[in-house]
Amino acid sequence: MISRLLVILTLAATVFALACGDDSNSDGTKLKVVTTVSPITSIAENIGGERIRVEGIVPEGVNSHTFEPAPSVARLLSEADLIVVNGLFLEEPTLEMAEANKKASAQVLLLGDNTISRGEWAFDFSFPESEGHPNPHLWPDPMLGLRYAELIHGKLVEMDPENKEYYDANLAEFRERIVDYDRMIKEAIASIPSQNRKLLTYHDSWAYFARRYGMEVVGAAQPADFSEPSAREVANLIDQVRDLKLPAVFGSEVFPSPVLQQIAREGGARFVDSLRDDDLPGAPGDARHSYLGLISQNMEIMVEALGGDKSKLSGLDPSPVFEGSSGAVYPQ
């Protein structure tokens, strides 16, 4: 009688779980992917969709260069099947923790190191060649972001070949969107008066973007040690803004800089403090809280501020390329 009752209860529990859409078993078979900065988390989410469990570890609004992972991150890294980082010396403390805690079967994917060669490294004000560490911000160039997606796709297919067709379809859609973005960005930048195609920013995040689209990065307010610029550096930047007759200088939405605002004011330029590099627009769940949303919003802001026609960017679709939701975790 008792055994019969147990069978009935077990069947009832199974029926109830199916009715509620309990997919705990399938979740257990999904690849666990741990990422660092939000643009990379979003790219992984787009390619892996609902077939992976992806979690970022660098909170949005935190300087990724100075981020020190908390001890609790070690557990997350120890459970990962795939650890995806930008590389190019951006996340050294996280990489050290990953190597110390990851399981033997886990793989680590360094995107930047596998996207450009050493000869293509960019050095600039925030990343001087004397320090030996290149500018790691490849993803503002959407074509390099596409390469990131291809690398993630390759690893997912290698580690989860049963879902190859799903990952292939997501990559194909992502590639189509990026190619559209690239075309529209070229047209929008071509609408900017040639003398205005210059960028003075708070942080040097635009080296590879500028290289692709014919822009010139003329300076950055944040020195290589991520402090505030000296009085001499501020004076030089003010002179530079005046001499070049820059229409705008660009700050960061998440790192307010009164110094850069002063530079813009005294140099006679408009101060635009809404660009982002590794912090996605909006909040998780918003349509633009994505890598594609990051690119489109930055371009609209930049093109308009420099005197171009932002309408040439209309039609950019920032939504996920897969149907449904992967449940990616973006730490806040």
Image (tube, rainbow, N blue to C red):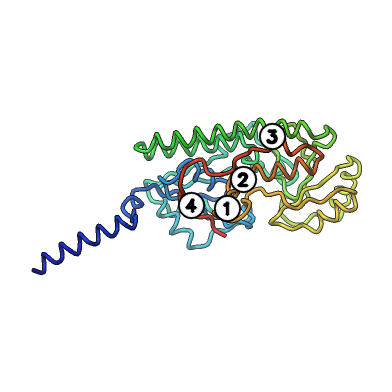
Image height of 95 relative to 188, above or below: below
Q: Is residue 274 left or right of residue 42?
A: right
In the picture of the structure, the residue carrying the numbered disc 3 is 185
Identify the residue at the far bottom of this view.
Answer: 2
**Is disc 4 surrounded by few (<14), some (14 to 19) or many (20+) residues within 10 Å?**
many
In the picture of the structure, the residue carrying the numbered disc 4 is 328
**Is disc 1 surrounded by few (<14), some (14 to 19) or many (20+) residues within 10 Å?**
few
Q: Secondary structure at mark 1?
A: loop
Which mark is first along the chain, 1 or 3? 3
Label annotation for residue 293 = 2
Q: Percent x, y for residue 307?
A: 82, 39
Amino acid type at image mark 2: Gly
Q: Residue at x 37, y 46 (%)?
A: 105
In the picture of the structure, the residue carrying the numbered disc 1 is 286
Find the distance from the CA under tag 2 to the CA under tag 1.
Answer: 10 Å
Q: Percent x, y for residue 53?
A: 43, 50
Q: Secondary structure at mark 4?
A: loop
Closest to the camera, between mark 3 and mark 1, is 1
